[in-house]
Image (cartoon, helix red, strand yellow):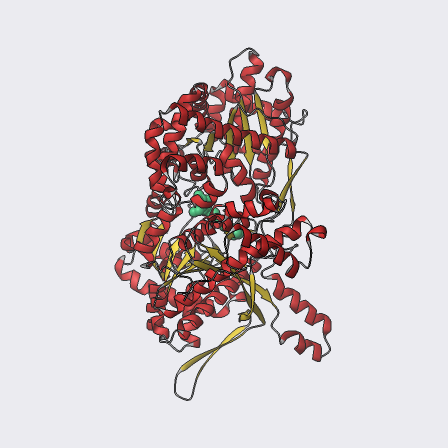
Amino acid sequence: NVLVEDARTGLDVETLKKAILNNLFYVQGKYPEIATRNDYYMALAYTVRDRLLQRWVASVKQYLEGKHRIVSYLSAEYLLGPHLGNNLVNLGIYKEAEQALHEMGLNLDWLIEKEIEPGLGNGGLGRLAACYMDSLATLEVPAIGYGIRYQFGIFEQDIRDGWQVEDTDNWLRRGNPWEIARREISYDIKLGGYVQHYMDRDGKFRTIWTPDLIVKGVAYDTPIVGYKVNTTNTLRLWKSEAPNSFDFQSFNSGDYSNAVNQKIICENISKVLYPNDETRSGKVLRLQQQYFFVSCSLQDMIGIHLRQGERIEDFQTTFAVQLNDTHPAVAIAEMMRLLVDEYDLEWVDAWRVTTRTFAYTNHTLLPEALEKWDMELFASVLPRHLEIIQEINRRFLDEVTVRVYGDQEKISSLSIIGEGPRRYIKMANLACAGSFAINGVAALHTELLKQTVLKDWYALSPEKFSNKTNGVTPRRWMVLSNPKLTELISSKIGENWIKHLDELKNLEKFADDPEFLQQWMDVKLEMKTQLAQRIVNRTNIKVDPESIFDIQVKRIHEYKRQHLNILHVITLYNRIKQNPEAEIVPRTFVFAGKAAPGYKQAKLIIKLINSVGEIVNKDPDVKGRLKVVFYPNYNVTNAQKIYPAADLSEQISTAGKEASGTGNMKLSLNGALTIGTLDGANVEIRECVGEENFFLFGLTAEEVENTKSDGYNPFHFYENNPNLKLALDQISNGYFSHLDDTIFKDLINSLLYDDQFMVLADYQSYVDCQDQVAEAFKDKVKWARMSILNVARMGKFSSDRSIREYCDEIWKVKSVPVTLNG
Ligand code: 26V
């Protein structure tokens, strides 16, 4: 076959121009004179989509023709970020599109900024899923991502009077050119009701589950193209609807309003993303969401497997299914139900298939984030699955009892069902029991998992455990978001590093090249100037691009300790107030991040940041040397603008609490130096970049635990540290809140009398370390040199490396190169 490029596949400037006008006419029904910015955005998006579809069809065809094991990534969240720019980068036509639009009198950035990002995730876990989809495609690995097509993603954050206010995220309001509705691909999902068992004529036990609600899941597919390869995988998100038959039943019996109600109940399931990060909600709707997408996905996979002419018993040869945390862990029970109840497998055969299919990634050590379901609630939604879980547990505990010599404590810790005033289901235990592999997301995190929350599981099956340190995609987080630095790097070492991030090490030999150092500083300053412009537009705060851009952007949480950062701000401010002539290296503190709407302390921390900013930013004694900015509505779009401008990356969580972090990687890759604790992936980042290029402070995870068991008394630190005392007293007395001495009471009390996260214990070490940062920043060239070495040594943290490890060590899958028109 000769490949003839046409108006829908050609990648040259002329063809792109024609295609954009063509789509403007035939998709938007417009011509240039009356086209709006959105019309042009859509016309360009469809032009890009046409090119994706060609590769997508070729990929699916190739996968179906051979026998390849397919990775199935199950995740309740995908925090993709805007598609347009990323797809242009991965297709290798960014420059061409820019040129085509330029010749049409348009500007690519202006259209890229028109896109509303799909915020179908809370934070780290959802963004990791998105980076992994990019790397799977780039490594040419056959993969499907399954999830939920929430009609409303993570809420939009606005700041009013210093407080967070939430607004709904209506991301679909202008349509979504990146998805294809596959209306013909749908599954019925049962919910609630009761279960009956009987013996059929052949003497076989049968189970009937009679639900009280059936919802339909409809597939919406988004193509995910790899970087400069043809491989284009599928992200399949399920939308819940009423089954076709449903309204008719009630309508015919005359109960129209009940029919409408049923429809609304069905549609509610995929209506909105739960905005809780690291806290459980335990709500019926959340369990329904989890089961809904898991059941649709498994039915879909079984269909694909059987259509390949394979036997159901060999399911695991077609799919390796990864559970992104416990959110999809009910898949283990659902797989058993499908195999035993629907496909008539014997229990032991079904269990063999199941336990060769699933692998589980844990993303948190915080006990409050481990998912548990009240048993009665669970039974009311999934009565059959409760029976199945009880049976899994019974057989499992039988086996275990022998192995732990009847040690009751171990048995109850391993049990999938927790006992107490109310019984409950422990999803992490279900995930462990049903998976052949279990992993943590950074070396320290995996070690702590083995020693603490999953200790007994590790003792039972050490061979299941491994570490897979997280990574981030350099395509979105460098090439797309930081084109200037990308170009500078490529001018020295070529472009190979974009796919082989280890090659960044070739930059080391330029770290003393004065011209390169100057160019490096120029790029950083330009990115800081651009961010300064955005900051003044959005917040009216004027910041100095020459100052240290000291950046903490992530979800707001006590364990992440944004309040430790603000205590440092107050400390610097007090130094100026005590001695206005004191030498202070100018700094801009940038905070951004959302607080879970029901998380009082986190919302108070946002208010505190804004209150301190209000005083510091306008105090004439400060002379503009300190600025505090809270940049609203942190999301992927904003992150892409913030990372390139960072000098200093704040990774200051209490040691032992942050599973990995991935923002730490993105900031460091963009040339920021890190101030951080020995937590999560910080440990490995420091090992790679060298301790001389990392600002380390604070207690270690072990010291945190020891301090606690020795009886930690935060009040002692308050009484004995005058600067700390002054800062805390100012917050309580209303110095930053128009003399209102009530608003921050809860925050201060929790610090003085409880301080779970050791803020006061780490305060002095943090301030001292920040003084070293300021000292180091005075020598701009030396700082730039550290920054270059830092970037040169970040190769390990590509999600390509992570995915390669998952492929080789867990999924046992190989790449399948895709050819066009082959
Ligand atoms: C829990 C829940 C509870 C129910 C409601 C919805 C919801 C959503 C998310 C979570 C837990 C999120 C756990 C999480 O995001 N962990 C983060 O995972 C990152 C990727 O591995 C890692 O870098 C971060 O350190 C870790 O906090």
Percent position of residue 12, x then y: 51, 52
685 vs 39: above or below: above
350 vs 434: above or below: below
Looking at the picture, tell me which residue is in the foreground, 675 or 103: 103
Looking at the picture, tell me which residue is in the foreground, 370 or 711: 370
Percent position of residue 649, x then y: 46, 32
90 vs 620: above or below: below
Percent position of residue 792, x then y: 36, 34
Q: What residue is drawn where x is 61% and y is 27%?
A: 613
Judge left or right: residue 274 versus residue 618. Answer: left
Looking at the picture, tell me which residue is in the foreground, 184 or 820: 820
Percent position of residue 567, x then y: 53, 26
Q: Where, by quadrant of the figure, is residue 457 drawn? A: bottom left
Check the picture and name the quadrant holding the N terminus. Answer: bottom left
Check the picture and name the quadrant holding the C terminus. Answer: bottom left
Judge left or right: residue 537 versus residue 572. Answer: right
Residue 281 appears in the figure? no
Q: What residue is drawn where x is 30% and y is 61%?
A: 400
Total number of numbered discs in the rendering: 0
